[in-house]
Image: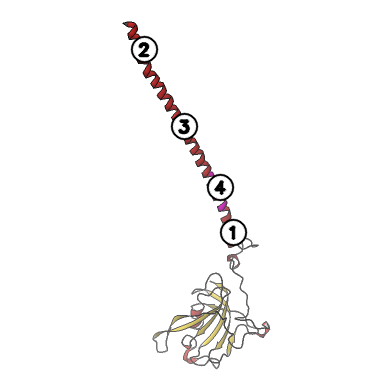
Amino acid sequence: MPSTNTRAGAATSARPVKRTVSTKGESAAQISKREQRARRREQERRRRNQTIGGVLAVLAVIGIAWFTFTHLPSGKSSGTTGATASNCPVPTATAIGPQPANPNTGPAAKPPALPANAKTQSEQVSYTAADGTDKTTTLQYVIITPGCGAAVKTGDTASVNYTGWLQSTGKMFDSSLQAGRTPFSVHVGQGEVIKGWDAGLVGMKPGETRRLIIPGEIAYGAQGSGSTIPPNATLVFDVTLLSIGQ
């Protein structure tokens, strides 16, 4: 019967149509929800990135400000160089070691007492003995006042103030701080001075005061120096480095 077949056909064709429409509707809704969730996640990610970026920017500004405050000298022009530019005090030609009550009295007659926390250090120094053999001896030194900046190296010109005493008697035999004297300049490591000085000045920094305890082998040796320094005398020097040249 045609009418029956038609209705059956119609009924049969209607069912899949409904399912198709329903499936498509559900899929679109699901896609729409996923898109919304994706958009929300993207927005949240952007907000987090913006927040993190803001925090990093603030930290960077704080870091730059801290570095500028702690590493650059205040009140100095950009053209300032040397010790002041590196936050080092400018060394002055002051008396060596503890200051006398009256600066006009000149150098101390005997080696001033060392600070309570002073540490005696030592290094081995090579020298050629009178018989031509190579030997070593011990140079002792004490950093009384630390310096600042670049250190003296062999070949530099060092400008210093100094006072020297005999260790055995404590008697002063020479000083650049005596009336009418001026700071002493020496080309370090070039043999212009006793070997104990060439070795002892290396490593000093501007403003540093160092005590050198120099055995006779690397001082004036068996011959001594005139009537002032006896043979094989151990010498004590307080040396203040004023500046370093090339």
Mark toward the viewer: 3 or 2: 2
Could you give the CA–CA distance between mark 1 and mark 4, rounded to whole angstroms? Answer: 21 Å
Callout 2: few (<14), some (14-19), or many (20+) C-alpha neighbours within 10 Å?
A: few
Q: Amino acid at mark 4?
A: Gly
Q: Amino acid at mark 1?
A: Thr
Could you give the CA–CA distance between mark 4 and mark 2, rounded to whole angstroms? Answer: 66 Å
The mark tally for this picture is: 4
For the residue labelled by badge 1, is the local secondary structure a helix, a strand or a loop? helix
Q: Which residues are magenta?
A: 50-60
Q: Are marks 3 and 2 in contact (CB under 8 Å)?
A: no
Q: Residue at x 58, y 58 (%)?
A: 66
Q: Which residue is mark 4?
A: 54
Quadrant in the picture for residue 24: top left
Q: Amino acid at mark 3?
A: Lys
Could you give the CA–CA distance between mark 2 and mark 1, rounded to whole angstroms? Answer: 86 Å
The disc, 4 or 3, on the residue closer to the chain's N-terminal end is: 3
Mark toward the viewer: 4 or 2: 2
Residue 190 in the image, given as x and y percentages of width and height:
49, 78
Q: Which disc is residue 10 wearing?
A: 2
The disc, 4 or 2, on the residue closer to the chain's N-terminal end is: 2
Q: Are marks 4 and 3 in contact (CB under 8 Å)?
A: no
Residue 48 in the image, given as x and y percentages of width and height:
52, 44
Quadrant in the picture for residue 14: top left
Secondary structure, magenta segment, majority class: helix
Q: Which residue is mark 1?
A: 68
Could you give the CA–CA distance between mark 3 and mark 1, rounded to whole angstroms? Answer: 52 Å
Q: Amino acid at mark 2?
A: Ala
